[in-house]
Every structure is written in structure tokens, then in C-alpha cells.
Image (spheres, grey):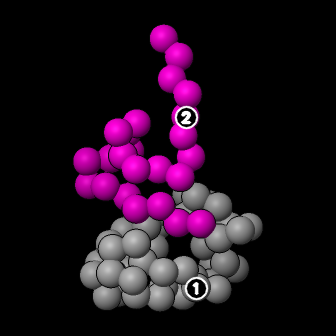
């Protein structure tokens, strides 16, 4: 299964049998780290060096409670 790197449009082949949700794969074209957020359907989200926070672009929006 392949997804397209959001950074460089390089197709990244991901073997869903070898990764789990929460693992990261790396684009071998630009080196971008992508976290596996979902296996079915396969969905990857860029991992920032600064870490996950609500300001990061994420396909899943979390509602923030006070
Ligand atoms: Zn890339």
C-alpha cells in the first residue's frame, strides 16, 4: 500500500503488516517522518520535531476542553 508524501509527493510504500498505529515511517525521498495514524484506511500524518500539538496540521481535530 502506498501513500503520497505530503512534502515531496514521493509515493511511500507502507507494508501494513509491518507497521502499527503510532509507529513512524520515513519518506526516503525527503526524510520526512510520518506517523501512522490509521491502518484502515492507511493514513499518515507528518511528525514535527517540535512534537504534536494542537497547532500542528492534523487530519484529526481534537476538541480542547478547559
Ligand atoms: Zn517526502
Residue in view at x 54 percent, y 40 percent: 61
Is 35 or 10 nearer to us in this picture?
Answer: 10
In the image, residue 4 lies at what x, y percent? 48, 80
On residue 2, the disc is 1
The verdict on label 2 being within 8 Å of ligand 1 is: no
> The residue tagged with tag 2: helix, strand or loop?
loop
Read off the magenta span.
43-66
Residue placed at 33% from the left, 74% from the top? 7
Give the mark nearer the N terminus: 2 vs 1.
1
Question: How many numbered callouts?
Answer: 2
The location of residue 24, given as percent across then percent down, is 47, 67
Dominant secondary-structure state across the stretch colored magenta: loop
Q: How many neighbours does mark 2 have within 10 angstroms: few (below 14), some (14-19), or many (20 or more)?
A: few
Task: Tell me: residue 41, above or below residue 52.
Answer: below
- Other residues around mark 1 within 10 Å, as few (<14) / some (14–19) / many (≥20): few
Contact flag, marks 2 and 1 (Cβ < 8 Å)? no
Q: Which residue is mark 2?
A: 62
Q: Is residue 20 visible?
A: no
Left-right relation of 53 to 3? left
- Residue 7 visible in rendering: yes
Amino acid at each position: 500500500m502506498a501513500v503520497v508524501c505530503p512534502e515531496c509527493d514521493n509515493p511511500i510504500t507502507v507494508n501494513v503488516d509491518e507497521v502499527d498505529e503510532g509507529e513512524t515511517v520515513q519518506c526516503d525521498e525527503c526524510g520526512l517522518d510520518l506517523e501512522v495514524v490509521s491502518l484502515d484506511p492507511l493514513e499518515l500524518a507528518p511528525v514535527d520535531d517540535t512534537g504534536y500539538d494542537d497547532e500542528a496540521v492534523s487530519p484529526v481535530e481534537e476538541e480542547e476542553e478547559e
